[in-house]
Structures are given as structure tokens and as C-alpha cells.
């Protein structure tokens, strides 16, 4: 029987969505140096095809992609859970688009869904593996630290540096396991915001609806958050290690929010100066790869509360027109 044109078009969209997701996945896994940058955009095709195909048909794209990834890895692994979480994030963001929420609530709700589901997935995986959550996470961190050390050796890092890192692996693992909750929350938040920015021009070009969030490069963090930053900073000076770790976890998430604000300020001035797109991409990559630039961007975001670099009227009631 010859398929209806509508059915053929839907099947083509599903196949394209799966292929796009798997291409990003392949680059993320097999190109270690730049792979993590590509992995941030795994939610993008899921978001796009969820918006285009609807909930039921859009759900087929991540399910098929996860099945292929499972065959690649030989079963359910922590890596599969990681990539599944990224795909679920794209799906959740698209779901939030239909709720007509603010940009802050859209991102927070989508991240909350992903982190809650991820925690449940880890619990179920630990039960299936007949091991504790802490042991499971600690083993995963140790494995990735060992892989990172092998990568450093392969790209020519000086032997003295490798020896110093190797001698501190136990301490690094100890700290990473305890700040993993904030690292997961901060990375999910940043990936959600990045895909939100990337999705708008693609969806508008394809005639798909996108929420009226206004100019995202004029976004500012809620002012009361600065008190949370100060509070977490003070907690870090307390003598109790467990309480200090609470401050560290809170600060990592809050500084990610101010990094997003700092990037919005940078984007605002890039747009104002009409820099060519190629130069913008190079500068963004430099920011992503240089820790000093990251610190500068965070400081710009923090001090924007007092300096107001973009001269935005904070009392303005009307939303900005969409770019």
C-alpha cells in the first residue's frame, strides 16, 4: 500500500531528527577535545522535532536515538543516562513552550524535570546494579578521571603536570563527588539556556511558534539572587566541612546564572557593534576554553546589578520586542 504523503513526511522528519541526534552524539563521543561542546546541542533536534511533530510523534525521535545508543554501548550505562537526560531536556523545554511561562520559569521547570527524572534514574540503576548510589557515582567519577588523565597524556600535557594530577586523583574525586549535585544543576541550566538561544532562529525560520521572551541578550537575573551569592560565600568560611560544601554547591549554581547574564551583556555589545558572525563565534569559543575569560564574564554579570552596563531601564513595564 502506498503511504499517504502526510505519513511519508512525518516518517522523514522522524528519521531526520534521529539522524541529527546521532550525528551530534557520535561527534560528542569520538572527538574528545571538542566533543563536550557538541554534546551541549543534543537537546536541540529533540526540541525542534517535538515542536514540529507534536508530543506523541516527537517522542519517537529520542526513543529511537536512545535505542541506537544502547546498542552502541552494549546496554544501559551511565553514559546512556547522561545522553538520555540531554534529550529529555530538549523535550521538556518544548513542552514548557506550550505553557506560556516566562523565560525563567521555562528554564527552571525544564531543568527541574530533567534533574528529578535523572535522580530517579540513578536510584533505579543503582538498585538494578545492586549497589549504593554513592558507590555508583564515585566509581563513575573515578572512571572519568582516569579517562581524562589518559586524554591529557595523549594530547601532550607535560609529564610534571600529569604526575601532579595523578597524585591528587583521590582528593579530586573526593571533591567532585560532593559537588556533583551543583555541577549537574549548573550544567543543565547552562545547556537549557544555550539551546533556548539556538532554537529561536531555527524555529522562526521554519515557521514554528516560539514564545515571546523578548531580547534574551537584555535578560537580567532577579536582584534578590545577589544576597544568595553573599550568603553562600559566607557559608564557605565556616569551619564545618559539610556546611562549607553546601555553600560551594549553592555558589556554583548561582555563578552559572551570573555567567549567563554576563554572556547576555557580551552578546548585547557584539550586536551593538555589529560584529560579523564568524568573529562572534571565535570569541565565544575563546570564552568557553579559557578559564580567565569565564571568571571575567561572571564578574561582569555580578557587577551589572550596580553598573547596569547595557543601560536597561529596570522600571520599564513593557517587554522588549522579540529579535
Image: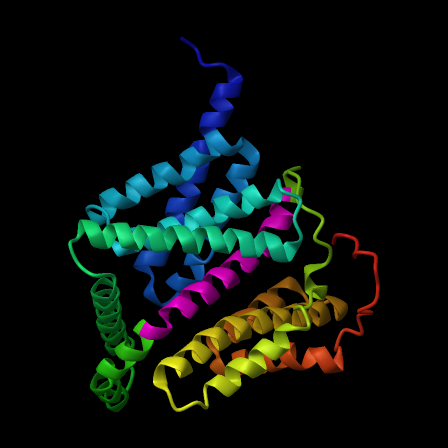
Tell me the quarter of the image containing the C terminus: bottom right
Which residues, given as a range, are shown in magenta? Answer: 178-203
Residue 13 in view here: no
Q: Is residue 151 above or below residue 99?
A: below
| 247 left or right of 70 in image | right
The reply to whether residue 57 is in sight is yes
Residue at 47% across, 67% down: 186
**Residue 197 highlighted magenta (yes or no):** yes
Viewport quadrant of the N terminus: top left
Image position of 72 (left or right of 17): left
Q: Is residue 323 left or right of residue 247?
A: right
Please tell me whether residue 129 belongs to the stretch shown in magenta: no
The image quarter containing residue 216 is bottom right
Q: Where's residue 249, x and y in %?
A: 44, 74
Q: Residue at x 17, y 58 (%)?
A: 131
* 123 is higher (above) or lower (below) than 174: above
Query: Is 24 situated above or below 148?
Result: above
**Quarter assignment of residue 307:** bottom right
Main SS, magenta residues = helix
Amino acid at each position: 500500500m502506498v503511504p499517504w504523503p502526510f505519513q511519508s513526511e512525518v516518517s522523514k522528519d522522524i528519521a531526520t531528527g534521529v539522524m541529527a541526534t546521532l550525528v551530534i552524539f557520535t561527534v560528542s563521543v569520538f572527538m574528545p577535545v571538542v566533543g563536550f561542546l557538541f554534546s551541549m546541542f543534543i537537546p536541540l533536534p529533540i526540541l525542534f522535532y517535538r515542536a514540529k511533530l507534536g508530543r506523541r510523534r516527537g517522542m519517537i525521535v529520542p526513543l529511537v536515538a536512545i535505542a541506537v545508543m544502547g546498542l552502541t554501548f552494549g546496554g544501559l550505562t551511565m553514559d546512556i543516562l547522561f545522553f538520555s537526560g540531554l534529550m529529555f531536556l530538549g523535550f521538556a523545554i518544548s513542552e514548557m513552550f506550550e505553557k506560556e511561562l516566562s523565560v525563567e520559569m521555562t528554564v527552571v521547570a525544564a531543568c527541574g524535570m530533567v534533574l528529578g527524572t535523572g535522580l530517579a534514574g540513578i536510584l533505579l540503576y543503582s538498585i538494578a546494579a545492586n549497589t549504593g548510589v554513592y558507590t555508583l557515582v564515585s566509581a563513575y567519577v573515578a572512571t572519568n578521571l582516569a579517562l581524562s588523565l589518559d586524554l591529557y597524556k595523549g594530547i601532550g600535557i607535560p609529564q610534571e603536570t600529569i604526575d601532579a594530577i595523578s597524585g591528587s586523583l583521590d582528593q579530586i574525586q573526593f571533591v567532585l563527588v560532593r559537588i556533583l549535585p551543583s555541577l549537574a544543576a549548573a550544567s543543565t541550566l547552562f545547556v537549557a539556556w544555550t539551546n533556548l538561544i539556538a532554537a529561536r532562529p531555527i524555529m522562526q525560520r521554519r515557521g514554528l511558534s516560539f514564545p515571546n521572551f523578548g531580547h534574551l541578550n537584555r535578560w537580567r537575573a532577579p536582584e534578590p539572587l545577589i544576597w544568595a551569592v553573599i550568603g553562600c560565600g559566607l557559608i564557605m568560611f565556616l569551619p564545618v566541612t559539610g556546611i562549607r560544601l553546601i555553600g560551594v554547591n549553592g555558589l556554583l549554581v548561582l555563578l552559572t546564572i551570573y555567567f549567563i547574564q554576563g554572556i547576555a551583556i557580551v552578546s548585547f555589545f557584539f550586536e551593538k557593534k555589529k560584529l560579523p558572525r564568524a568573529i562572534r563565534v571565535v570569541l565565544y569559543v575563546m570564552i568557553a576554553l579559557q578559564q580567565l575569560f569565564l571568571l571575567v564574564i561572571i564578574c561582569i554579570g555580578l557587577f551589572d546589578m550596580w553598573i547596569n552596563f547595557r543601560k536597561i531601564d529596570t522600571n520599564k513595564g513593557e517587554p522588549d520586542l522579540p529579535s
